[in-house]
């Protein structure tokens, strides 16, 4: 591991990642990210990143916004969905420190991974003849995760053979992904570190792909947050060495080529995913920037106001006061939903009642970190009457009050089950 202080988050998304094949996002009819590039740059710098890039899916629109604003230490990257032509299996390969013209050619070639990699290698080989040019690097992201392959069924699914080919094509691998669990990241790290010369030679013979460089079994290992929600940018990063007080993107690329980089920072897991999805629902219900579609799940009224308290750290004092006044007024009117009300109406009543509690308001107001506010909310919500009755409905139990809510809960379940996207095959 290098000892220098330079850091960069090499896996990060903005609203330019606006089309998704991921089940969770499709289920709620939302894009992968609503994150604003300008705000991301500010947050990354606050969190100590020396360089800044975005790795949107097959797009450089987000990072172009940063460059157009004249923001410092920015370079162009994109996470490309590229395809093995033998069977249509897709993987993600991030290309970093591109020019706009190089991105256009990568975009054209990504339908065939061999053609795309050949173009990149050609550009790298020609760098000595272009003094002062940007230097390219590319790497496979989350190598043990199948990507956008469900439409192809078994024939196009990610297999060991695809991973073996990718290891021959790429000398840099992401092994620390901030949205994946520690166990999966450590497994990926061990597998890549276990490569040796006999293994690479055996794979090269098996797949008829020539390995690259003098020691192709010694992969450069990098990390990034893979943040889509704006909650965790810069929480996972790549450390690199460089001369001078202000590194450039070319310094980063050269450090990767020398294998003088290392991944560091936070791991992810189910909680990270849940927090990110909740944030996406909030962002999607408050705005649909740049013409992107609104979510299928509406989060209006009290629930939307509650999400604003959780996620909008700069929410105006007036907004908070108005919301708390509504909660108190609702409590004065009698608070709880009545038999025959819709599930949404009952839930709204319970949320207002919860937020009228002085102790809960003090707890939420005193909590600074977004993740901690989410935990406070997650701890309180299951104790509301609709949540308890929802659980009882699944178990066919419940109190007489739950019995009165049961038709509304069943209607809510039925409406969601007929409007969500196709379920995953697994």
Image (cartoon, rainbow, N blue to C red):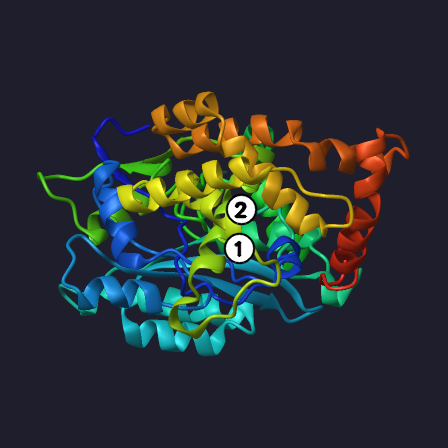
Whether pointer 1 and pointer 2 mark residues with C-beta atoms closer than 8 Å, the reply is yes
Give me the residue at 37% from left, 30% from top.
369
- Residue 65 against residue 255 in the figure, above or below: below
Q: Which mark is residue 252?
A: none
Query: In this rendering, would 327 be left or right of 417?
Result: left
Q: Quadrant of residue 299?
A: bottom right
Does residue 399 appear in this view?
A: yes
Q: At numbered mark 1, what does the secondary structure look like: helix, strand or loop? A: loop
On the image, the x and y values in percent for residue 166 come to 56, 54
Which residue, given by chain and number where applicable, does mark 2 sit on? 303
On the image, the x and y values in percent for residue 237 come to 35, 38
Q: Residues within 10 Å of mark 1 (few under 14, many from 20)?
A: some
- Residue 211 against residue 317 in the figure, above or below: below
Of 254 and 298, the residue lying toward us: 298
Q: Residues within 10 Å of mark 2 (few under 14, many from 20)?
A: some
Give me the residue at 67% from left, 42% from top.
337
Query: In this rendering, would 153 be left or right of 206?
Result: right
- Residue 11 against residue 371 in the figure, above or below: below
- Residue 190 against residue 213 in the figure, above or below: above
Rounded to the nearest angstrom, the CA distance separating label 1 from label 2 is: 6 Å
Which residue, given by chain and number where applicable, does mark 1 sit on? 300
């Amino acid at each position: 591991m290098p000892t220098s202080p330079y850091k960069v988050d090499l896996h990060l998304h903005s609203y330019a990642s606006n089309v998704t094949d991921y089940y969770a996002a499709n289920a709620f009819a939302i894009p992968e990210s609503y994150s604003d590039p300008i705000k991301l740059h500010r947050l990354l710098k606050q969190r100590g990143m020396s360089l800044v890039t975005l790795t949107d899916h097959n797009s450089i629109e987000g990072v172009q916004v940063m460059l157009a604003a004249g923001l410092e230490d920015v370079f162009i990257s994109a996470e490309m969905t590229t395809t093995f032509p033998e069977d249509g299996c897709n993987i993600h390969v991030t290309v970093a420190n591109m020019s706009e013209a190089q991105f256009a050619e990568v975009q054209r070639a990504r339908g065939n991974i061999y053609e795309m990699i050949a173009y990149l290698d050609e550009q790298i080989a020609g760098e000595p003849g272009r003094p002062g040019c940007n230097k390219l690097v590319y790497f496979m992201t989350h190598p043990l995760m199948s990507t956008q392959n469900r439409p192809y069924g078994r024939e196009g699914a990610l297999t060991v053979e695809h991973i073996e080919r990718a290891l021959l094509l790429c000398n840099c691998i992401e092994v620390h992904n901030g949205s994946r669990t520690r166990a999966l990241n450590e497994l990926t790290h061990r597998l890549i570190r276990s490569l040796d010369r006999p293994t690479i030679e055996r794979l090269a013979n098996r797949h008829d792909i020539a390995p690259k460089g003098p020691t192709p079994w010694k992969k450069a290992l990098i990390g990034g947050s893979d943040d889509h929600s704006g909650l965790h940018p810069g929480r996972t990063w790549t450390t690199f060495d460089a001369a001078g007080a202000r590194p450039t993107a070319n310094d980063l690329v050269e450090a990767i080529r020398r294998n003088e980089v290392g991944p560091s920072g936070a791991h992810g897991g189910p909680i990270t995913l849940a927090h990110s999805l909740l944030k996406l629902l909030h962002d999607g219900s408050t705005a649909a920037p740049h013409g992107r579609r609104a979510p299928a799940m509406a989060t209006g009224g009290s629930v939307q106001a509650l999400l604003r308290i959780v996620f909008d750290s700069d929410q105006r004092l007036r907004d908070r006061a108005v919301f708390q006044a509504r909660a108190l007024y609702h409590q004065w009117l009698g608070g709880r939903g009545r038999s025959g009300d819709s599930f949404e109406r009952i839930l709204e009543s319970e949320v207002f009642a919860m937020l009228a509690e002085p102790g809960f308001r003090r707890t939420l107001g005193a909590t600074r970190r977004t993740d901690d506010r989410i935990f406070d909310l997650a701890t309180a919500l299951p104790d509301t009457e609709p949540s308890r009755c929802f659980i009882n409905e699944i178990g066919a139990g419940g109190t007489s009050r739950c019995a009165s809510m049961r038709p509304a809960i069943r209607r809510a379940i039925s409406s969601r089950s007929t409007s969500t996207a196709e379920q995953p095959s697994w």
